[in-house]
């Protein structure tokens, strides 16, 4: 069951997790966000909520709750569960018959944060030929995610990298993908990917520290010329890639390690001034 800890919030009412039902969003359309909790603080909550409302707008859907109401619910969920580290899922489900909001769900999700060894040595990744429909909208259960999950399990990978029908590399199935080439950070264009919150913060860090951040189309055969690759995500922060298919990458790249330190610093600053 997805609901973790003791309580969840359903349509602004607190309920015990044994009443949670996965069928809440088995039909219709759902938009969602996953927010990391550190020291009782919902990290980068404003960015997550901006993207949530943007996802709904892209699909011509309207969320009933305001940003302040959602923030209040998040604080309440943390307090009633007395849980100060983890991952919260925010799901808004719409009735398939009229596209009106039907369910507002907020609950702790089981989480996996990478180990110290994975941050040090990197992770294994592979290729998945798939594209997302509406890549800028964070929607529940896409065909690309299901296909990716199968490859991850079959090949025992940490993540798969998506490639579109034109041979361009876009993102991970549940993460963003970035490259390092010389003193620059490279990414697929924002129009082609889900605009992840961790990726957004990496871009901010680059701009603040005069690190060149380039967005361009990246082909599969470009990858063997990259100095380093890494994943970003709410649970991952910045996670080095050691292997992609048969390609091996350095996980000790100087710029990569600098970005990891700066990202941790950004989290500490946010917790100090949420």
Image (spheres, rainbow, N blue to C red):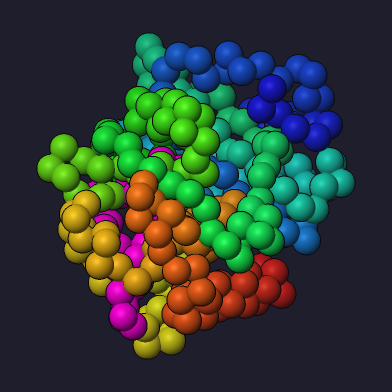
Give above or below for 65 relative to 224.
above
Quarter of the figure that contains the C terminus: bottom right
Give above or below for 199 relative to 7.
below
Judge whether residue 192 is colored magenta.
yes
Give above or below for 127 relative to 99.
below
Q: Residue furthest bottom?
A: 210
Q: Quadrant of residue 210?
A: bottom left
**Left or right: 226, with 220 as reference point:** right
Name which residue lies at 57% across and 62% down: 121
Name which residue lies at 27% across and 62% down: 224
Is residue 213 at all visible to an observer of this figure? no
Foreground residue among 5 and 151 = 151
Foreground residue among 151 and 204 = 151
Give above or below for 246 relative to 15.
below
Quarter of the figure that contains the N terminus: top right
- In percent of width and height, residue 190 lies at 27, 56
Q: Which residues are magenta?
A: 171-193
Q: Quadrant of residue 218?
A: bottom left
- In percent of width and height, residue 95 lies at 44, 17
Foreground residue among 225 and 162 = 225
**Left or right: 102, with 151 as reference point:** right
- In percent of width and height, residue 49 lies at 51, 51
Foreground residue among 29 and 238 = 238
**Left or right: 271, with 214 as reference point:** right
Name which residue lies at 78% across and 61% down: 39
Is residue 143 at all visible to an observer of this figure? yes
Name which residue lies at 58% across and 30% down: 104
- In percent of width and height, residue 114 lies at 64, 53
Judge whether residue 82 is colored magenta.
no
């Amino acid at each position: 069951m997805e609901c973790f800890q003791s309580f969840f919030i359903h349509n602004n009412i607190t309920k015990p997790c044994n009443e949670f039902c996965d069928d809440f969003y088995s039909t219709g359309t759902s938009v969602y966000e996953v927010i990391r909790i550190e020291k009782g603080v919902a990290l980068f909550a404003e960015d997550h909520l901006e993207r949530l409302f943007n996802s709904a707008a892209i699909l011509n859907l309207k969320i009933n709750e305001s940003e302040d109401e959602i923030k209040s619910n998040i604080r309440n969920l943390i307090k009633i569960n007395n849980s100060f580290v983890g991952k919260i899922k925010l799901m808004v489900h719409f009735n398939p018959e009229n596209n009106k909001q039907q369910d507002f769900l907020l609950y702790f999700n089981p989480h996996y944060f990478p180990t110290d060894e994975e941050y040090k040595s990197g992770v294994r990744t592979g290729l998945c030929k798939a594209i997302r429909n509406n890549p800028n909208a964070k929607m529940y259960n896409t065909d690309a995610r299901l296909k990716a999950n199968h490859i991850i399990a079959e090949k025992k990978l940490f993540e798969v990298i998506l490639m579109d029908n034109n041979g361009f590399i876009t993102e991970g199935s549940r993460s963003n993908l970035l490259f390092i080439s010389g003193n620059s950070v490279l990414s697929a264009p924002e129009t082609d990917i889900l605009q992840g919150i961790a990726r957004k913060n990496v871009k901010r860090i680059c701009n603040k520290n005069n690190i060149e951040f380039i967005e361009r189309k990246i082909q599969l055969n470009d990858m063997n010329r990259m100095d380093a690759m890494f994943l970003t995500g709410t649970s991952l922060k910045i996670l080095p890639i050691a292997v992609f298919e048969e390609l091996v990458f350095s996980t000790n790249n100087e710029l990569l390690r600098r970005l990891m330190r700066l990202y941790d610093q950004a989290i500490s600053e946010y917790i100090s001034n949420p």
